[in-house]
Image (spheres, helix red, strand yellow):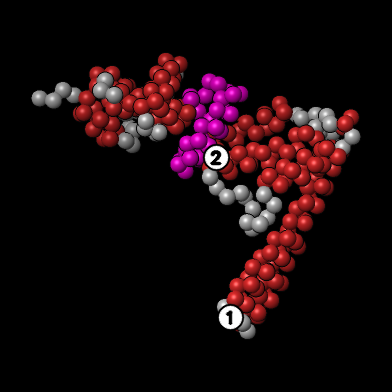
Amino acid sequence: MKGFRSLKNKTAFLATFVIGTSGVGSLIGVFGTLAAVSGYSQDLEREADQVGFRRFVELGYDPRESTKVFQILQAEAKRAKTKEPYFFGSHPRLQERIDNFTALVQALPAEKHQGRTDAAALAAAIQPVFSPNATAAFEAGDPGAARASAERHLARAPDTPAMLFLVAETHRKAGDASSSATALKLLNALAQSHPDYADTHRARGMLLLKGGSKTEAAAAFHRYLELKPNAADRAYVRNFLSQCEPQS
């Protein structure tokens, strides 16, 4: 709220300032407003770090864990090649947040450099998130994030065909020979362990057809249609089947 009010007040001043000036004066006004608001927010964020860290320690958590959320965000921002998740570019960067918490940890007496993590409880609490996150990321065209979420789900529930299939699909969609080979290996294993999971056979058929194994591909497509006789993509799969038939 303080940041919003500060921005609102400074923006109102800027609007008046720009009316009476032009050129360099206007530009300086814009950057001055953004710098003022960003600096104000930066001070508030440092205060939030200090208060949050104090509560973290009071509750008995291991203070060394406090940097991890920012390290995870930093790794994700780097992986996705996105800007760090702050409104202003001059806002504290994730590395600065890591440095802030590292300094707070180092300022504690050595005997307080330990505590509980509740890792198992956290893993159980967030388990339901990974499957929908994996699906959403895959549909959004982010196979890396999709695979990471699917694998975290599988770490606690390894016999989940939908997530096993999604991991295979992230490799298949890559399209290169190595990824396709990995995808086919995963799909073959899934077809053995969960033979009634229909989508596996369709994906296997596409890879086998691409690799020239038309007889095996046809069997996979037939199995898919057997399991999903009313599949929305039935005509599409029938077209693949026609490509598996000997040419007269």
Q: Give percent across and percent down for residue 244.
A: 22, 25
Q: Secondary structure at mark 1?
A: loop
* Residue that carries the numbered disc 1 in the rendered image: 22
Does 217 sit left or right of 70 as displayed?
Answer: left
Residue 96: say if magenta.
no
Does 172 sit left or right of 20 as displayed?
Answer: left
* Residue that carries the numbered disc 2 in the rendered image: 79
Highlighted range, magenta: 135-164
What's the residue at 55%, 47% (across, down)?
Answer: 82
Task: Work out whether 149 lies above or below 181.
Answer: below
Q: Give the alpha-carbon distance from disc 1 to disc 2, as whole Å.
A: 42 Å
Mark 1 or 2: in front is: 1
Residue 152: say if magenta.
yes
244 or 178: which is nearer to us?
178
131 or 211: which is nearer to us?
211
Amino acid type, callout 1: Ser
